[in-house]
Amino acid sequence: MKRYLLLLAGLAVATAASADDHATRLALARETIAAMHADKMFDAMAGQMKQMAGQLSPLPASATPEQRKKFEEIQAKALDLSMGSIKSLMAKMDEVYANVYSEAELRAMKAFFVSPEGQSMLAKQPQVMAQVMPLVQEMQRDLLPKMKQLAEDAKANP
């Protein structure tokens, strides 16, 4: 019985230490994500998504003003839904970071992102994205007809 009680006490201590460790990692994860300026990246991504949405689904020139208005309303709603989902996902990133990264890794990441080099990297991300986005759009333009053909082939040859 004494061994059983000692085992339970040891388990309780280990569980408490593990919870404290997780709480520490969670706090560090939040600090790291804040140092990464994730909120600014989200805002920039939202702007880019709006721009891409307009380019990827243009209306035909023959569309009536009513059709254009309806299309813009649906597009805005779809974008709002997407942004809401992404924002919800980002709100859970601290938990993901705390589960994946060790305390030492989180401390190192945070140290990098608050350093001049880390801040410079973050500040240059819009330039990187400005150069990557046309490449992504080109890839999508090339891929879309191939995907359509693949779907047509699948329909023709069940």
Image: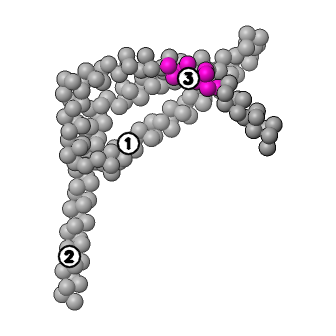
Q: Return the x and y of residue 97 as percentages of the image width and height.
A: 33, 45
Q: In the rendering, which numbered label is found on residue 139?
A: 3
Say if the magenta span includes residue 104: no
How far is disc 2 from disc 3 in space, using C-alphas? 59 Å
Amino acid at dot 3: Met
Tell us which disc is closer to us: 2 or 3. Answer: 3
Tell us which disc is closer to us: 3 or 1. Answer: 3
Mark 2 or mark 1: which comes first in sequence?
A: 2
Please tell me whether the stretch drawn in magenta is mainly helix, strand or loop: helix
Locate the C terminus by quadrant: top right
| Residue occupied by mark 1 | 93
Q: Return the x and y of residue 106 as percentages of the image width and height.
A: 24, 42
Residue at point 24% right, 27% down? 118
Q: Is residue 2 left or right of residue 26?
A: left
Quarter of the rendering containing residue 79? top right
Dots 3, 1 in contact, CB < 8 A: no
Is residue 119 visible in the rendered image? The answer is yes
Mark 2 or mark 3: which comes first in sequence?
A: 2
| Residue occupied by mark 2 | 9
Q: Is residue 113 left or right of residue 149?
A: left
Amino acid at dot 2: Ala
Mark 3 or mark 1: which comes first in sequence?
A: 1
Element class at badge 2: helix
Element class at badge 3: helix
Q: Return the x and y of residue 5 as percentages of the image width and height.
A: 21, 82
Residue bounds of the magenta highlight: 135-144
Q: Is residue 77 left or right of residue 116?
A: right
Amino acid at dot 1: Met
Instruction: Compare residues 55 and 148 and report the one nearer the observer.
Output: 148
Q: Return the x and y of residue 136 as percentages of the image width and height.
A: 51, 22
